[in-house]
Image: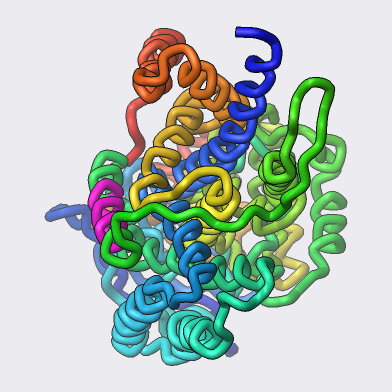
Amino acid sequence: MTAPILEVRDLCVSYGKVEALHHVNLKVFAGQIVTVIGPNGAGKTTMLSAIMGLLPSSGEIEFQGEVQRDIEVEHLVAGGMTLVPEKRELFGEMSVEDNLLLGAFQRYRVGDRDEGKTMDQVFTTFPRLRERRKQLSGTLSGGERQMLAVGRALMAKPKLLMLDEPSLGLAPLIVREIFHIIADLRQTGVATLLVEQNARAALQIADYGYVLETGSVALDGQSRALADDPRVVETYLGLGGKKH
Amino acid sequence: MNLEIALLLGQDGIVNGAIYALLALALVLVFAVTRVIFIPQGEFVAYGALTLATFQMGKTPNTIWLLLGVGILVALIDTIIAVRGGNLGRLKRIVLWNLVLPAVVVGLVLLLEPGKLPLAAQVALTLAIVVPLGPMVYRLVYQPLAEASVLILLIVSVAVHLVLAGLGLLFFGAEGSRTTPFSEAQFQLGTLAVNGQTVFVVGTSVVLIIALYQFFGRTLYGKALRATAINRVGARLMGISNTMAGKLSFTLAAGIGALSGILISPITTVYYDTGFMIGLKGFVAAIIAGLASYPLAAAGAVLVGLLESFSSFWASAFKEVIVFTLIIPVLMWRSLTSHHVEEEE
């Protein structure tokens, strides 16, 4: 089997004296969608922030076969890791087009100048963004903002795309559209680490899943097996799967 | 007052206003990107003017030794950090920007006898000495405090200002200097006598402002700076390092400061502490714009310039008082019309 693109070993994060994440182990392989589900406050966002270098952590993060010491966000972005954060963090007073362009900043810096082509691909994936290209991103609807956030991340041509709650606050129809697009991304060879509260939708498109509870991995397995696991069904999918 | 005097005062006000506008833009830029209120801006004005004046007196300005010293300090710190972190790949850049570049500049100054060079070459050398000090000061002082509150950054700015002003006194002495004008031309515009230097100052300022506008609107690096100003976390996630953005904005601010000093030094006698006063007036203009809007800052600067020149005619003893008193109604109006937003972080 090929080596994973991302391997997290023994990851711990503390906020002051409170340890928010305890000894988390996780692997993501190229072309795979891995989901991390769990309730509010389980440490999902904390985990992504730590992997991305936004939070100090202990443990080992191996990205593309390289153990990351002294992790710097900019360094990881240059290496092909991108995070679409829960809050989107768009540049509200700038146009959709400029937001996308800045997604390619790190590539542009090292001399990769085909951002125009990548933008066309993003517009093909999200036709709505093409219509809104001149509009300020702060004026977009919730769904469009999420599309822009994902599109902006894709502008970096990532090898690992990390998505933090892409369904948060969106209408079910738009959630479905976005999840379709995430599932389609697999064909391009991008590995995706998808953090979600919407366990049903996440497990449907994922290959592998982890359940994070109070800062530790409670369960993990093939997503189909997880979806059938009585503990997951009861807690996250609800009786008869009526949740969401 | 007759029309002739009003026109003369107006001309004066617009010339000074153009300089204040440049400084105000730099202040807004630095604050937006790094949250630093860049009080030492004025020292860059003075260093620019006085370094050029020293060249014209046929002497060697001591600012070259400052550049060399600060460069060595930055190189030392960065090398230690790079070696500890195992990032030996960075050494080349560190040495190039902090040791080689200053050494080349110092070498040129010592070899060339800048006093005999044409004015343009003297200006270029002056900028080459003063501008790199901007990012170096950022690296030494502000980068380790990037997450500090605005208030702490302000206090640090006051300290940096005092240190640089003291060094200015040490380097250039207490006497003021003037430089030779860029243009000796003089022409009549109706009843108004306009001299070439005036046109040069206003023209250069306008060109610079347009260039800055293009930089922020058209280039990816300009957009990256705006992005950092809008959303620091978002920018980092795009690989736009806050450090890079900070250094770039300090480079621009130092460049604008030094150039402003060079522009005004033929019109007014510049002392080691003149820059501070000029910088403060740029600051008044930036405050009028709420430290946020570039066009408002430029407009505010022209207002400050005009107010200053007219009040120097009517009440010259109170000229500074009147200009700085302008801040009070502006602040009152701002605090009444804007909602209080809790500072982030």
Residue in front for this viewpoint, A84 or B296: B296
Horizontal side of residue B200 vs B341, given as left or right: right
Q: Total label count?
A: 0
Q: Is residue B159 magenta?
A: yes
Q: Give me the residue at 33% from left, 27% from top.
A: B342
Q: Give me the residue at 45% from left, 43% from top.
A: B31
* Extreme residue in the left direction: A17
Horizontal side of residue B184 vs B124, given as left or right: right
* Residue A72 image offset from top left, x and y in percent: 43, 70
A242, above or below A71, in the image = above
* Residue A11 image offset from top left, x and y in percent: 31, 70
Q: Is residue B78 magenta?
A: no
Q: Give me the residue at 52% from left, 56% from top.
A: B258
**Image quadrant where residue B202 sits:** top right
* Residue B69 image offset from top left, x and y in percent: 33, 79
B338, above or below B291, in the image = above
Q: Quadrant of the C terminus of chain A?
A: top right
Q: Give me the residue at 82% from left, 68% from top.
A: A114
Residue in front for this viewpoint, A100 or A209: A100
- Highlighted range, magenta: B157-167
B162, above or below B55, in the image = above
* Residue A36 image offset from top left, x and y in percent: 46, 57
Report whether residue B172 is seen.
Answer: yes
**Image quadrant where residue B87 sits:** bottom left
Q: How is the image coloured?
A: rainbow
Q: Quadrant of the N terminus of chain A?
A: bottom right
What type of secondary structure mainly makes up the magenta span?
A: helix
Report whether residue B249 is seen.
Answer: no
Residue in front for this viewpoint, B158 or B44: B44
